[in-house]
């Protein structure tokens, strides 16, 4: 596992709406030296030259690939370019951070994972919520067993905009919640069913409702839309002991833990004559834990640099990105088949 004994020399390709946030964060971290940025827009490059001194700007990705001082490449172009750019960067011996989703197809994602492995390079995907303090807090208490056995989760990620042209609302918004479902349910997904509708652009769904079926009967349900009057960023986790709600629109009280559940009375189930006798509803305290917030994107960028420097595998590594791509791909097939349940083939070992 290769380690680096200096600041990480960085170059970024794509500095649009989201890329400028990544650039701001990487530029602020002492372990990074941002050397070069590449964008197709001359206006964006001119603005960046005003904003950052000593920043080399280019519209040619080859300039980055041939720059020996660049150890790692940040890719924040729109999704259709992720695969080609990541492949070229890995082939040129650069570590890669790529925005979500890793690629558009399972085949592409597998190739990127294999390339990173073969060249002993870190490959990390921007599954931001895996670095968000409210979500990592809930992950910790799940791992400690405080919520009991996690039965199902559901998420609402809806807003008016951003309307994209090259991917639908599910592909654009669901990678975050899929990465969380994998983290919180901690078992393999087995099938996906998705329905949705295109109202604004032909063939590009503005809204999608998807269910991911996991091993042991666990479920994740996702509602994604860019055509909605509300801005909701909420995840609900239902465990056998307690339930948790993470509401990212809340400024401070992002997590609420509900001591709620249904307890089975001791004894054989069938010895009861009705539902009320067999089960008791528990409605206890609602706790709002104090969570020290820090910018999730800063934590994500820091993690990438730490992994490049130490040689450790990122939390949201290529394999994690690949699983999310498999789920996105299965959901696409299901959408085209009017919600048919699409089985996931067991993942080949790569
Ligand atoms: N993690 C998050 O919460 C989050 C939020 C929004 C977007 N994103 C992701 O960020 C990525 C970018 O989205 P965006 O909204 O910033 O898009 P955008 O269109 O605003 O920006 C993309 C930029 O890439 C440039 N570009 C495209 N192809 C290029 C190429 N071959 N060489 C050089 N420059 C090129 C474009 O000129 C543009 O400036 C997407 O993958 C999206 O999924 C992530």
Image: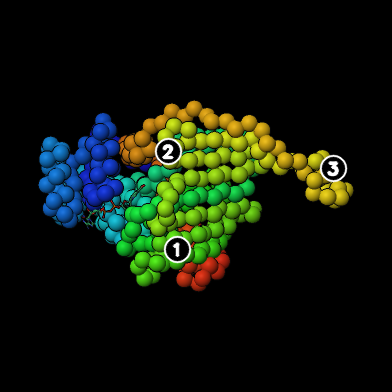
Q: Is residue 158 above or below residue 80?
A: above
Label 2 or label 1, whichever lies nearer to me, is 2
Specify whether residue 305 is in view.
yes
In the image, which disc is placed on residue 157? none
Q: Nearer the viewer, residue 147 or 38?
A: 147
Where residue 263 sits in the image (x, y, percent)? Answer: 74, 41
Residue at 16% from the left image edge and 49% from the top image edge:
44
Distance from the alpha carbon under mark 3 to that under mark 2: 42 Å
Distance from the alpha carbon under mark 2 to that under mark 1: 26 Å
Residue at 28% from the left image edge and 42% from the top image edge:
21
Distance from the alpha carbon under mark 1 to that under mark 3: 45 Å
Q: Residues within 10 Å of mark 2 (few under 14, many from 20)?
A: some
Disc 1 secondary structure class: helix
Residue at 38% from the left image edge and 32% from the top image edge:
294
Mark 3 vs 2, N-terminal side: 2
Question: 88 left or right of 282?
Answer: left
Q: Tell me the quarter of the picture where residue 314 sits.
A: top left
Q: Nearer the viewer, residue 102 or 50?
A: 50
Specify whether residue 319 is in view.
no
Q: Residues within 10 Å of mark 3 (few under 14, many from 20)?
A: few
Question: 285 left or right of 298?
Answer: right
In the rendered image, which residue does mark 3 sit on? Answer: 267
Asked if the residue at tag 3 contacts the one at tag 1, i.e. Cβ–Cβ closer than 8 Å, the answer is: no
In the rendered image, which residue does mark 1 sit on? Answer: 329
In the rendered image, which residue does mark 2 sit on? Answer: 132
Look at the image and tell me in which quarter the C terminus lies: bottom left
Mark 1 vs 3, N-terminal side: 3
Look at the image and tell me in which quarter the N terminus lies: top left
């Amino acid at each position: 596992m290769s380690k680096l004994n200096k600041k990480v020399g960085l170059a970024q390709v794509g500095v649009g709406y989201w890329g400028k946030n990544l650039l701001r964060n990487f530029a602020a971290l002492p372990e990074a030296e941002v050397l070069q940025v590449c964008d197709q827009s001359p206006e964006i490059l001119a603005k960046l030259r005003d904003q950052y001194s000593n920043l080399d700007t280019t519209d040619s990705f080859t300039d980055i690939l041939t720059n020996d001082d660049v150890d790692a490449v940040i890719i924040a172009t729109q999704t259709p370019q992720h695969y080609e750019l990541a492949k070229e960067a890995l082939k040129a011996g650069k570590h890669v951070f790529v925005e979500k989703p890793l690629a558009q197809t399972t085949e592409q994602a597998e190739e990127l994972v294999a390339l990173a492995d073969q060249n002993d390079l870190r490959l990390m995907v921007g599954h931001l919520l895996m670095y968000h303090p409210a979500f990592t807090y809930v992950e910790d208490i799940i791992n400690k067993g405080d919520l009991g056995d996690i039965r199902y989760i559901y998420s609402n990620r809806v807003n008016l905009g951003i309307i994209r042209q090259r991917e639908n609302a599910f592909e654009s918004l669901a990678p975050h919640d899929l990465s969380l479902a994998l983290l919180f349910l901690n078992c393999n997904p087995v099938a996906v069913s998705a329905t949705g509708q295109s109202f604004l652009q032909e063939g590009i769904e503005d809204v999608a409702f998807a269910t991911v079926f996991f091993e042991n009967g666990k479920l994740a349900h996702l509602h994604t839309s860019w055509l909605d009057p509300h801005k909701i960023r909420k995840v609900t986790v239902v465990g056998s002991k307690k339930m948790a709600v993470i509401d990212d629109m809340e400024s401070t009280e992002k997590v609420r833990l509900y001591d709620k559940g249904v307890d089975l009375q001791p004894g054989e189930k069938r010895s009861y004559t009705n539902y009320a006798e067999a089960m008791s509803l528990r409605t206890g305290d609602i706790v709002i834990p104090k969570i020290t917030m820090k910018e999730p994107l800063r934590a994500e960028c820091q993690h990438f640099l730490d992994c490049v420097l130490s040689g450790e595998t990122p939390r949201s590594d290529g394999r994690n990105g690949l699983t999310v791509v498999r789920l996105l791909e299965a959901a696409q097939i299901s959408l085209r088949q009017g919600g048919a349940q699409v089985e996931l083939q067991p993942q080949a070992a790569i």
